[in-house]
Image: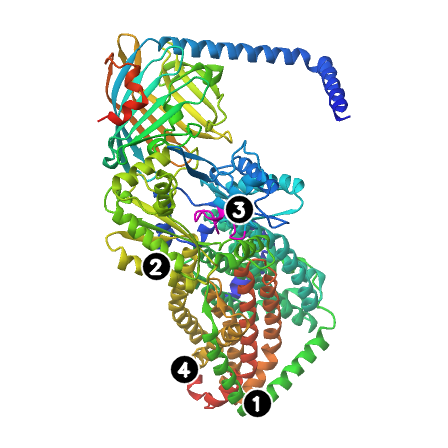
Amino acid sequence: MPQFKTSRSAILMLAVGLLLGMPVAADTDAEIVASREKGLQIATEQKQRDTGWGDSESNVLMVLRDASGNESIRRMRTLALEVTGDGDKSLIIFDEPRDVRGSAFLSHSHPTAEDDQWLYLPAINRTRRIASRNKSGPFMASEFAYEDMSSFELAKYQFRYLRDEAVNGVMCYVIERLPADKFSGYSKTIAWVDKEHYRVQKIEFYDKKQSLLKTLTASDYQLYLNKYWRPMLLRMQNHQTGKSTDLIVEELQFNVGRSAADFDVNVLERLR
Amino acid sequence: MIQRWLQHILAYPRLVTVLCLLLIIGSGLGIGNLYFRGDYRIFFTDDNPQLLAFEQMQQQFNKSDNILIAIAPADKQVFSAETLTLVRQLTEAAWQTPYSIRVDSLSNYQHTEAIDDDLWVADLVGDELELTRSELNKIAQVALNEPVLVKRLVSADGAVTAINITLQLPEQNLQQEVKEVWQAISGMLDTFKASHPDTDFYVSGVVAMNYAFAYEAENDVKTLIPVMFAAILLMLAWLLRSVLASLATLVIIVVTVVSTLGLAGWAGLFLSTATVNVPTILMTLAVADSVHLIASMQFALRRGDSRLQAIQYSLKRNIMPVFITSATTAIGFLTLNFSEVPILRDLGNMTAVGVMLACLFSLVLLPALLLFLPVSAGQHKDSAAGSADSTMLWLANMVIRRQQPLFWGMSIVIIGCSALITLNTINDEAVKYFAADTEFRQANDFLEQNLTGATTVDFVISGDQASAVNQPEFLTAVAGFTEWLQRQPEVQHVNSITDTMKRLNKNMHQDDPAYYRLPENQQQAAQYLLMYEMSLPFGLDLNNQLNLDKSATRVAVSLQNLGSKQLTAFESRALAYLAEHASAYSATAASTALMFAHIGERNMASMLQTLPLALVLISLLLVFSLRSWRLGVLSLIPNITPALVAFGLWGLLSGEINLALSVVAGMSLGIIVDDTVHFLSKYRAARVEGQAAEQAIRYAFTTVGRALWITTVVLVTGFAVLMLSGFRLNSDMGMLTALVILVALVIDFLYLPACLLKFDAKEYKTDATV
């Protein structure tokens, strides 16, 4: 009985739609499809241009600021390995604060499946797996969530091209990204990707209630291996709490000879 | 001088009216600038030490502005599939609250568990969890044994649970933001109430309190102002018995209120729970001026004067008394400037300006209006006045006849009542500012009885270096403090990082209960926290408990609702404990409840210091207008004693002095002094003419007795209207002020004459020559 009701009203709506709204609806539908296609196209190009870098090693400084401007720093080394056909692998070794020195965070990301994550704690000389669905929380109490820093994979989002817009004099595509993962902390993000090099200039993060939560600005782009642009400064500003975090890349090298073996779980406990 | 001025006003009534109109319109336009503020911060100056401590704490840690929704299922069983599903849904919906940055509930509590060699951190009531009997038992088992949850988000008997929404209001337009939050919450709860008719929901928290402040003020506007208008119309009809005269008075009242509010708007003031009643108070005070003027005019009309003559007569007779009484009333209200509470200062200044405007309009605009209007002399006036005057004469004779018993009897009563003042204690609890039948108060009372106290105090304990929080000695000190807090009788719940640390240590050792203790060294503590923090989802981080560089931690304590004395006592006891047992670290305490607890005493202290000043000022004014030092000194008796008696009676009636009451003495002084001025000036006039004290008292009674009686009735009615407010700061203030004014009349009629007969029996030779 209820089913019949629903279908009848559905038919009714369809009829009304056919009579009144169809041309308009078809138009907007076509527009949406087109903007999605263009969005995906741009994202694909962005990913494409960032393919083939192999492996890298960097020293990173994080400067955290609270609402009244008090600062606190974190230091870490990161190793990254590009994996074709799957998500990238990364290893973060913490140097500061002193009391977590030597702790290491290993992540095998996957485009659609949940990432595999482990944390090695030198104080108890043990490695623990971390449930990765909780990747939306702050990383080292900073304004970056782990999901903000994990590798960019096309399958993680649904894209939509919004418009062209200049950021700091650089002409950009503005792309909306809807996260596919329901454990994401965001309802959507909007990225400004420059037209010339497909570099992310800015990202706005919207929380689950659709309010602007944070803005990431990427700057000091440098060219590596004549092909890959990397920002040396990432600044994340939280608009709701007034806190911010600067992520400063102090040193970055490519082709350091890392292989999959360096990213094996068993390596963690042998790290120095 | 005054004569010529009067001639001008009466010669060009149109010009005067137009000029007044311009003034009214010019100032009235400022009403557009007025806005409303209902948040609790309006009670505190920017440099209030408790506010500063609170704000500093909020900047270092996350904000603690919140909405707390208590959920009480009819079967008193939170751990049922139905209720836990409701909690889960409500938690999800709560994230949609505007400005929310965090939602804590039973369902999204991050339960930690050691599974194999891994640390499992997940929602206690996860999305996909099947709520079978055994799962429900397990959830109940975890929740009722978790110190973070019990008596905070779930009651110890599992009958009531709560969802806490932490908000970060941008504070651009706080009033609007609070309203937005409230509407979102009510809308959300309406849906859940409809689908769960057997479940009760109660909304509390700081933002709910802010909303209640605004809502009750709005309620005051909606209910008190119409009541006040009705009361004034009734009084005018009774006193003036003339429609047009009443109309003229209404005009004066309205333009006074409009220009006062407009000037306040120009001055950048805002309306608040306190100043929202300025119109009500002004109506009361303005009505007296007009009534005096019109009554005298009607008297002159009745004896056959032309309208112009009658107005001239009335002005000549009233100009000084109206001015002096307005000035003393204004001075009384200006003493509120010494209050610690900004909105009480606003109340004082707005009323003082309003009173002087009422004086101006009564002396300038009213005569012009009366020239245009064919005001009648008022019917039955002669007989009414005659009988009133004969009543007054009888009263005068009675007082003179019984002067000895009256003097001693009243002295004893006054001293006795004054002694009762000690029954009063200063108490400022923001929650108790709301009448017991208001929605906010009922939600709070329910929480208090069924879940936890709504009073919170946050302690911040800071080490002197980054990562101090991870040091074993620091953690031991905080754990010691936490245990000490839990032993205090008034403490309901303590939220401390040390409980999390102990739990993590246990988790890291395969959930072995023997390891439910603090980690052994700094590295362990730091790395457990690192691991835990990496596992927490959006919004549920530790930033509300740990500061940026982990040099400090916040310990949040919920207490049963305490009076301000007990609360400040608890604060100093806790800080003394920390000074003794954790002297290596610095500690501060802050919360909205503490802010209110301190403001009452600070306000009382400053108001008590101001009183003598106001008294001296007003007495000097009396000495000046009575031109007699002796009468000036004697006037202290009827000026001081009413407040003493009224506060004594208050000790019997209530015994609680909140910050609105601490200003009543100064405020009412300016009003009651009017009675003394009128009475003593007539008395002196008679004495200077050579009459004996007894005869002078009879003269005073018959000439101003009725006027005093009338104004007292008007004022008592006006302030009594405030008693209808659902906001106790206003209702208590109205009641006590009405009481002071009433007692003042009794003292003026029964005690002052007896005193004059006793202490002013000498002849007035010297005065006459001066």
- Note whether B501 is above or below B366 in the view shown: above
Please check whether the numbered discs 4 and 2 fall on a single chain.
yes
Q: Give the distance between the C-alpha atoms of the residues marked 3 and 2, in whole angstroms.
A: 27 Å
Give the crowd class for mark 1: few <14, some 14-19, many >=20 residues within 10 Å.
Answer: many
Which label belongs to residue B770?
Answer: 4
Mark 1 or 4, nearer chain start: 1
Please check whether the numbered discs 3 and 2 fall on a single chain.
yes
Report if the CB atoms under discs 3 and 4 are less than 8 Å apart.
no
Residue in the foreground of this view, choosing between B609 and A252: A252
Residue in the foreground of this view, choosing between B500 and A10: B500
Name the kind of residue labelled 1 in the image. Ile
Q: Which residue is mark 2?
A: B574
Report if the CB atoms under discs 3 and 2 are less than 8 Å apart.
no
Mark 3 or 2, nearer chain start: 3
Closer to viewer: mark 4 or mark 2: 2
Q: Secondary structure at mark 1?
A: helix
Report if the CB atoms under discs 2 and 1 are less than 8 Å apart.
no
x, y (%) of residue B41? 44, 50
Which label belongs to residue B400?
Answer: 1
Name the kind of residue labelled 4 in the image. Val
Closer to viewer: mark 2 or mark 1: 2
Please check whether the numbered discs 2 and 1 fall on a single chain.
yes
Mark 3 or 1, nearer chain start: 3
x, y (%) of residue A71? 28, 36
Name the kind of residue labelled 3 in the image. Ala
Mark 2 or 1, nearer chain start: 1
